[in-house]
Amino acid sequence: MTATEGPPAAGDEGPRDTGAGLPGRRGDTVAAVVRQWRAVHPGLDTGPMEVIGRINRCAALLQQAEDAPLRRAGLSRAEFDLLGALRRTGHELTPSELARETFSSGAAVTKRLKQLSERGLVERRGDTRDRRVAFVRLTDAGRDTVDGILPAQLAYETAVLSGLDGPELGELAALLGSLLGQLEGRLGALRA
Amino acid sequence: MTATEGPPAAGDEGPRDTGAGLPGRRGDTVAAVVRQWRAVHPGLDTGPMEVIGRINRCAALLQQAEDAPLRRAGLSRAEFDLLGALRRTGHELTPSELARETFSSGAAVTKRLKQLSERGLVERRGDTRDRRVAFVRLTDAGRDTVDGILPAQLAYETAVLSGLDGPELGELAALLGSLLGQLEGRLGALRA
DNA sequence: ACCGGATAATTTACCAGTAAAAGATATCGT
DNA sequence: ACGATATCTTTTACTGGTAAATTATCCGGT
């Protein structure tokens, strides 16, 4: 087949679907998907798709990338989030507080705590006043684990973002912050 | 306890941890988390965290929001992605192509196809030339399902992004596109 | 003092996704 | 033509998450 830039000839065999998958020479996969949608439904306002699709796709790729340094330390991202919440707040947290901090369900926190305490990274202690609540704290090993991973994690993040220069990065952070502020302030309200 | 705005007094009971959870009056949850990290590890370069954390958090909130209209139609996001890939490409796809298009594993696609074909939304047909491959296509019901959901989905997306005005939206899309282009071009290479 | 209702954590049953292996078929080198 | 190798899909065994029910405890009103 020809290797020119034009659309594939009818009956052309070989890889089709430049929709998703590997991005074309110019434009990301989301742009290609949006193009496909517009071809099928010409009336569509695809503006929101371009933003939301890219956020989702960036998040997927970034998480995949960030998991690499964690896996080396034998932790999942969810486990690291939990340990990180304890580390950055600097004090004990109850399971429900941990659930709030890590945006996950109470049941998930219970499971993770069981594993993490079996591995000696966290300890639990019952409250004497209210015997329903438990307090969870990092062990020394847990704190060392977090502090050991964190620099590598941040270095990895820096590397992954190295394609954007300083001003772009700042602008992106600001715009995302604004969007996130809206979403966090509003979605609770819209869902209620 | 007092209801004033100041920092909680020592020994103060009640909700602590403005880290994550509900965002404070000003700033999103990510900003709060970053503040906590800086307090604990003052030397850290938190620039990347502010971008990556916000992307992840936005993605989580947006996905949660977008799932609402789908759930009403009895579809999961993953199922809709699969149907959507068939719809937007406009032709049959093999399971491996579907896996590439939806960024998921072949096994996951197999499972979803089983369910979707039981529900009469997709059909399979074996290739006569290469009997290893199967071709999957939308049924009329499947196409109608997608076309019925899509407008509601886009309207929902528009509503959710309504906090940003046009220029901001465009700028955000452009920056994300640039980042995504880098990630998609680069991560495959970095992981190899 | 005690009952009804709220709250904290856990347990249970289940579901979706994954990685690795299996099964079936095609292709290439000799 | 034949065997090794690659490719496409499905299956298997397992993991991690969730929703709903469960257990235990606290609190507020009468």
Image (cartoon, coloured by chain):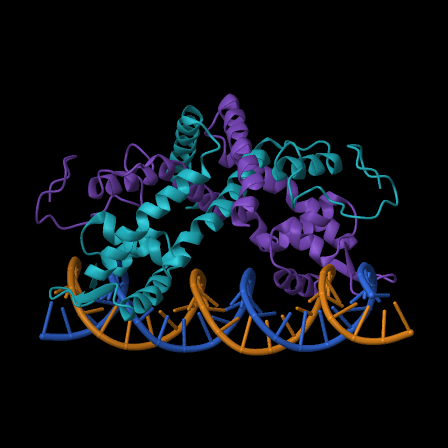
Chain colours: A cyan, B purple, C blue, D orange
In depth, the one of A100 and A82 nearer the eye is: A82
Q: Position of residue B110 (x, y in %)?
A: 67, 64
With respect to residue B44, does D28 lie above or below? below
In depth, the one of B37 and C19 nearer the eye is: C19
Q: Position of residue A178 (x, y in %)?
A: 40, 30
Residue at the outermost top position: B167
Tell me which residue sits at (63%, 55%) in the image: B79
- Would residue A114 be visible to someone looking at this image? yes
Relative to A68, B134 lies left or right? right
- Would residue A138 be visible to someone looking at this image? no
Number of residue marks: 0
Q: Position of residue B5 (x, y in %)?
A: 16, 34
Relative to A31, A176 lies left or right? left
Relative to A14, A24 lies left or right? left
With respect to residue A173, does B104 lie above or below? below
Relative to B182, A98 lies left or right? left
With respect to residue B62, does C25 lie above or below? below
Q: Position of residue C28 (x, y in %)?
A: 81, 59
Residue B75 sits in which quadrant?
Answer: bottom right
